[in-house]
Amino acid sequence: MDTLVIRQYKHSDKKEIFELHVRALKNEDAYMYTGAWEKDFEDIEGIYLKNRGEFIVGTVGDKIIAMGGLRKMTENIVELRRMRVDPIFQRKGYGQAIINVLEKRAKEFGYTVIRLNTSAKQVAAQKFYKKNGYMEMRREKEGWKVDNIIYQKKIE
């Protein structure tokens, strides 16, 4: 296993994380097109880092190969967002390393619930979240072509 280094997002990562986002979704046939739902990529600092949240990247060498963020929803609920691992580096434990750090940070921030969503097309992601104790709450279309699955996990 190549050594994964996890660190907080910095502004110079902006282009590379968006490319990772698109590449990972296309690999799962879950990428439709760029749109308003991706506006958070324009202000990672304001939406995540300066608002009781977190955004981390995992690097191997000088390449960002994994990422994930926490975005405040309410005082007690945080949303797990933008969990991505480069398709070439999947199934090596890097996603697990990212989610472990994010869950720890959510607890440190005082959140008691983590929510997330993934599409019905992303079967591997669904298995990953279930393995990590996330329970399916509901499915919704929200204008998408496929069901959007909402998961939740209580943390203590």
Image (tube, rainbow, N blue to C red):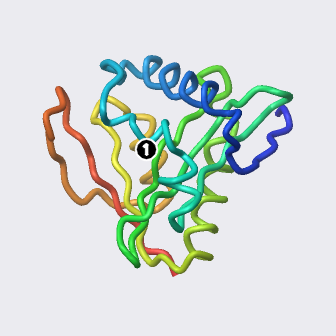
Q: Percent position (x, y) of residue 118?
A: 35, 42
**Residue 143: image location, x then y, percent:** 13, 34
**Which quadrant of the figure contains the N terminus?**
top right
What residue sits 71% from the left and 50% below the top?
Answer: 8
Q: Position of residue 69 (x, y in %)?
A: 54, 51
Total of numbered circles in the picture?
A: 1
Res 72 quadrant in image: bottom left
Q: Residues within 10 Å of mark 1 (few under 14, many from 20)?
A: few
Where residue 155 appears, as percent x and y from the top left, is 49, 75
* Residue drawn at 30 percent across, 19 percent down: 32
Residue at 53% x, 80% y is: 110
50 or 81, which is in the foreground? 50
| Residue located beneath label 1 in the image | 127
Above or below, 59 against 51 in this view is above
In the rendered view, tell whether residue 91 sits above or below residue 57. Answer: above
In front of the other: 147 or 45: 45
Q: Amino acid at mark 1?
A: Lys
Q: Does 64 sit left or right of 81 as displayed?
A: right
Residue at left offset 38%, top offset 53%:
116
Observer-nearest residue: 27 or 72? 72
Q: Which quadrant of the view contains residue 124?
A: top left
Seen in the picture, residue 22 relative to 125 is either above or below; the reply is above
Q: Secondary structure at mark 1?
A: helix
Q: Is residue 39 left or right of residue 45?
A: left
Up-down: is 85 above or below 5?
above
